[in-house]
Image (cartoon, grey):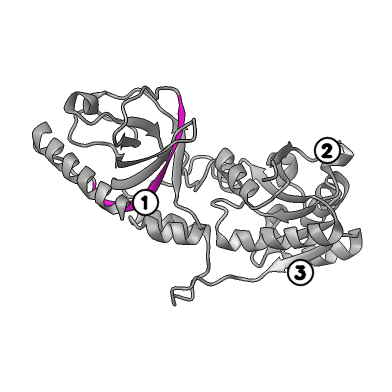
Amino acid sequence: MKRLRVVRGWRDLPASDRGAAVAMGMFDGVHQGHQRVIALAGDAARRLGVPQAVITFDPSPRDYFHPNSPGMQLMKRDQQARALEALGVDMLYVLPLNAELAEMTAEEFAQQVLHEGLGARHVAVGFDNTFGKGRTGDPAAMRRYGEELGFSVSVAEALEMGDGSQEKYSSTRAREALQEGRPQEAAEVMGRPFAIEGEVVRGRQLGRKLGFPTANVSISGYVAPKFGVYATRTRLQDGRRLSGVANIGVNPTIPGEIEPVLEVWLFDFDEDLYDQVIETELVAFLRPEQKFPDLEAMTRQVLEDAAAARKLLAS
């Protein structure tokens, strides 16, 4: 598999980082609709004999224009890069979304960034893509700029989900599915299970004392899935993949205010994971988070959840 090269910025790039066929968008989740746009860039790259690239922005427009809004990411930057690499993308352009870029008109963006900065040979966009100050640029405008500046343009049409709903594949639908406790539906949209990646931090270590040690990972920045218990699969830093059961929430049985966290119990595993980065896929929702009258009742339920998760994951 080709290795993805991450290029930050658009000014003064060497020739090796210019002249690609690019797909443009946020691509949060790299869902199946996104994959159609990326495939168009791939087709153009092969036709033109140039690298295949993706353009995205950091921070996201949502985070830049609404910095105090809750986290809504479907994936972190490293997860996005791995998903793009798996699709055969050669380069990921990460453009810094700052005052300069935010103030560019659609025409200025096409001229200064796409043409002069990146030297794009082809630009692929989705049917609903907008760009430039005030989101005034659209696919029709991109085609006009391409004709003027010398790059070809392709537009991916809307892709309907195959469940009879006539809804389109979208990051919004994936987020809503997760918020409502339907991780399988989110996985259908994304083409892979939604996964939370982060460093294992020290918690209250109560689970270890009760016989089910958990690895705790912050969910900050991610869209918050429905609080509750999930059957999971976790990828460790060394590549091993382990089945488990996880609670996402604030653990209301235990006194004390805490931030929402993922607490995953990895089956048949007892190694120190502190400070390691792990990635946990949400495979199925088992039940909502609940407050128990005491630790004994909570322990009984956790063991029942674990048995249910083992059975589900084995099937």
In the visual, does 90 lie left or right of 269? right
Tell me whether circle 3 and circle 2 mark residues in contact (CB < 8 Å).
Answer: no
**Magenta-drawn segment:** 276-288
Residue 102 percent across, percent down from the top left: 70, 46
Q: Residue at label 2?
A: 11
The image shows residue 38 at horizontal and vertical percentages of 68, 58
Can residue 129 be seen at all in this image of the molecule? no
Q: Residue at x 35, y 22 (%)?
A: 202
Label placed on residue 233: none
Mark 1, Cα crowd under 10 Å, few <14 / some 14-19 / many 20+, is many
Closer-to-camera residue (108/161): 161
Give the CA separation, mark 3 to mark 2: 26 Å
Q: Which quadrant, please, contains the C terminus?
A: bottom left
Question: What numbered label is drawn on residue 283?
Answer: 1
The first of marks 1 and 2 along the sequence is 2
Q: Mark 1 falls on what kind of element?
A: strand
Q: Which residue in the structure is indicated by mark 3?
A: 140
Residue placed most toward the observer, 158 or 141? 158
